[in-house]
Image: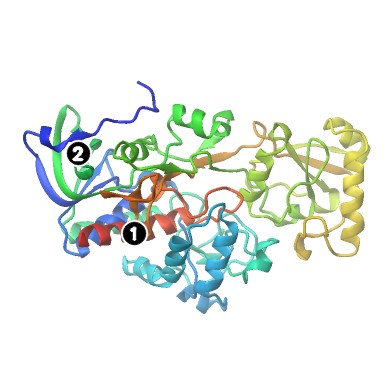
Amino acid sequence: MSGLDIPDTVDAAEVTSWSDEFDVVVIGFGIAGGSAAVSAADAGARVLVLERAAEAGGTTSMAGGHFYLGGGTAVQQATGHEDSAEEMYKYLVAVSREPEHDKIRAYCEGSVEHFNWLERLGFRFERSYYPGKVVVPPGTEGLSYTGNEKVWPFCEQAKPAPRGHSVPVPGELGGAAMVIDLLVKRADELGVQVRYETGATNLVVDAGKVVGVAWKHFNETGAIKAKAVIIAAGGFVMNPDMVAKYTPKISEKPFVLGNTYDDGLGIRLGVSAGGVAKHMDQAFMTAPVYPPEILLTGIIVNKLGQRFVAEDSYHSRTSAFVMEQPDSAAFLIVDEAHLQNPEVPLVPLIDGWETVEEMEKALGIPEGNLVATLNRYNENAAKGHDPDFHKQSEYVAAQDKGPWGAFDLSLGKAMYSAFTLGGLATSVDAQVLREDDSVVPGLYAAGACASKLVQDGKGYSSGTQLGEGSFFGRRAGAHAARS
């Protein structure tokens, strides 16, 4: 069988006996599925969650714990950062390839309430701010910049504000596991049934409406009747066939960010019932060069010696532009006065050279190109500005004190990590949509199996996955319970 195969649907008329009947069945217990389950149960629905793994969490449990939230949260207010739903909306629209205005509007206007809901689960975002440019705050700081809000041209399109809210667990991985544990506890309090090591295999349909789920638990099989089904089964980064077809760059060496069950089954189940998948060619890939942020005073060039991105961009934006360069090759050039080793050694230092001409030759850059690029940058930096890429002044500094070093950002040399961004098209209430934007009755999708608010790495902000996964998971659960 191919990883591209679409499962057959099961005609309800062919189901001779139902093993169970629930109001809402949720497929997957990551942050989207957990949020959907507790919201549906809180609205009075009888809810069952099917989870293929032996425990809840999915890829969410591997995440650092950023939530992209704004509009004036308690942490923003406590740390003196003015924000509004309108400025957040303008920013997310600006960074989206194909903005879905109704969903972005709902997310921004509901952001403060969603922040409060997350805290009601049982933890508290620390009322503190980390001011540096960082991938994940080194401590338990509750707020930091996790996107391109201060990067041109977005800083002119919306008033910058930090919106990366971190759960109070230090470190790069595992912070979101705290939220999963709290969702499991809340689901249990609300009477949600969870069946582990039990996977959905097919959707059951009746005249185009999804009315149930076929399941498998080791050698047991059956079918569960449901008034609504919510798919929250992750992305497809672990499916080699889907990756090769839709996001071939991920096949070229990055470390993939996912769990065993990020195999695209949720997306393919949605398609089987008539749903359409969008932005399947889009992926998040990144190999951060910072911290330390002093490295961003240097210049990033391609193999032709040309700059192509503002170096102070958020790391996934820089990396997305690297992928578009010839051979996906790029170098960070820094002089001795600004050279430090990255705190996380993802981008290797190639070597150091006494002259830029020697470096240019060693890197295989056409003669004179790097010299000209660096000279132009240094001339402008001496005046304190960057007219070519509008880098923020705090990161503009002449690189004229040799020797010079070069870090390798090239795909296959730097250690890139990646996950997929495409998924099922959904409404503002997370209903799965057909090609003509009509709703597939009885079917919802949220989390990594749904198409994202921001659909590519150039505009991605850390925290949008957990933020929108939990937000639209809640909307899916509430809407499914009502209907």
**Would residue 168 be seen by someone viewing this image from the given angle?**
no
Dividing the image into 4 quarters, which one contains the C terminus?
bottom left
Colour scheme of the picture? rainbow
Q: Is residue 80 visible?
A: yes
Residue 381 located left or right of residue 131: right
- Residue 44 spot, x, y in % from top left: 16, 63
Callout 2 crowding tier (Cα within 10 Å): few <14, some 14–19, many ≥20: many
Badge 1 amino acid: Asp
Residue lying at the far front of the rendered structure:
436
Q: Nearer the viewer, residue 123 or 391?
A: 391
Position of residue 367 in the picture relative to residue 307 (left or right): right
Question: 50 or 181: which is nearer to us?
Answer: 50
The quadrant of the rendering that contains the N terminus is top left
Give the residue number, with chain letter if any, for mark 1: 429
Q: Residue furthest left?
A: 17
Residue 415's tag is none
Type of amino acid under label 2: Val
**Sequence-wise first label, 2 or 1:** 2
Q: Are marks 2 and 1 in contact (CB under 8 Å)?
A: no
Give the quarter of the image for residue 242: top left
The quarter of the displayed image where residue 117 is located: bottom left
Element under label 1? loop
The percent coordinates of residue 245 (x first, y second) are: 50, 29
In the figure, residue 124 lies in which quadrant?
bottom left
Residue drawn 65% across and 67% down?
157
Residue under circle 2?
204
Which residue shows up at 33% across the image and 54% down it?
180
Tell me the distance, in whole angstroms, between the alpha carbons under discs 2 and 1: 22 Å
Place of residue 68 in the rendered image (x, y in percent of width and height, measured from the top left): 49, 61
Give the residue drawn at x 54%, y 68%. 88
